Structure formats: structure tokens, C-alpha cells
Image (cartoon, grey):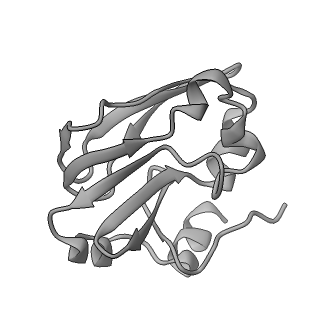
């Protein structure tokens, strides 16, 4: 099976993706992760204003099969959360790289992204 792995993003081994635009990092879970989880029924996210440390837990995604922790790709302040997921968690399945995004972080150091996996490295991990 082939999964969508956009080149412009960076990836954590725990299956989160990160997309940086002007120091703001948008975060979600990968196509592979949502497929493995099955139908997502609940997403727990931090509050706006919370400060996260890179590669530490920030929330939970719950599906009909499993509950999985979510990890922050970078350190910084949460400046937006995707409130649409509270009423429509299935967006994570339907559009994991678009409408299913989870939060945005004002990155303390956007260079932290350089330590994450490239699309090719992530593809090798899930192969």
C-alpha cells in the first residue's frame, strides 16, 4: 500500500508531521498513522498559550482500535488548535495533511525541524 508523504514536511518517528511557515509550525499525524489507527473518534489537544517542549507529549488521538499519544516536533507556544476536530475527529482520517491538522506552534527554534525525518527517511521507516 502506498501512503501520501509530502516532501515539504518533516516527520517524527512517532508519525507526526510538521510544516513550518515563517516560524509557525503546523502539526498533524501522517497518512500512515491515521490508516493504522482506523476511524478516529476523539482528539485531545493542548490549550492555546500552552508551552510545549520538542518531542514531548502534547495530546492524544483515540480511534476505534487504539489510543495513541501525540508528540510535539518542536518547542514553543501553542498559538492555534484545530477546534473543528472536537466536533469532527474524522477529519484526521479524511484529510490528515489538510483539514485534519491539529495545532500550530510558534517555534522557539525552527531549526529543530532539521533534526526530524525527511519524507524519504520517513518512507524508509514505515516500509
Nearer to the camera, 9 or 50: 50
Residue occupying image coordinates x 65% and y 49%: 99
Instruction: Please provide percent x and percent y for residue 7.
Output: 59, 80
Q: In the displayed structure, would residue 122 be above or below residue 50?
A: below
Instruction: Please provide percent x and percent y for residue 115.
Output: 28, 74
Residue occupying image coordinates x 63% and y 58%: 97
Quadrant showing the C terminus: bottom right
Total marks placed: 0
**Left or right: 22 as drawn, with respect to 81:** left
Residue 40 figure quarter: top right
Residue 51 figure quarter: top left
**Left or right: 37 as drawn, with respect to 52:** right
Instruction: Please provide percent x and percent y for residue 103.
Output: 42, 46
| Outermost residue toward the right in this view | 1
Residue 2 figure quarter: bottom right
Q: In the displayed structure, would residue 51 be above or below residue 75?
A: above
Instruction: Please provide percent x and percent y for residue 76.
Output: 19, 54
Q: In the displayed structure, would residue 52 be above or below residue 44?
A: below
Residue occupying image coordinates x 68% and y 22%: 65
Q: In the displayed structure, would residue 115 be above or below residue 3?
A: below
Quadrant showing the N terminus: bottom right
Nearer to the camera, 99 or 63: 99
Residue occupying image coordinates x 30% and y 30%: 47
**Left or right: 118 as drawn, with respect to 49:** right
Amino acid at each position: 500500500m502506498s501512503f501520501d508523504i509530502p516532501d515539504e514536511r518533516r516527520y517524527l518517528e512517532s508519525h507526526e508531521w510538521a510544516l513550518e511557515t515563517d516560524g509557525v509550525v503546523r502539526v498533524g499525524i501522517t497518512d500512515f498513522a491515521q490508516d493504522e489507527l482506523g476511524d478516529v473518534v476523539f482528539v485531545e489537544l493542548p490549550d492555546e498559550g500552552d508551552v510545549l517542549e520538542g518531542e514531548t507529549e502534547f495530546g492524544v488521538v483515540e480511534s476505534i482500535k487504539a489510543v495513541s499519544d501525540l508528540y510535539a516536533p518542536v518547542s514553543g507556544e501553542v498559538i492555534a488548535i484545530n477546534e473543528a476536530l472536537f466536533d469532527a475527529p474524522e477529519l484526521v482520517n479524511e484529510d490528515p495533511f489538510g483539514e485534519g491538522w491539529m495545532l500550530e506552534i510558534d517555534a522557539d527554534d525552527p531549526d529543530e525541524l532539521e533534526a526530524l525525518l525527511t519524507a524519504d527517511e520517513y518512507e524508509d521507516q514505515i516500509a
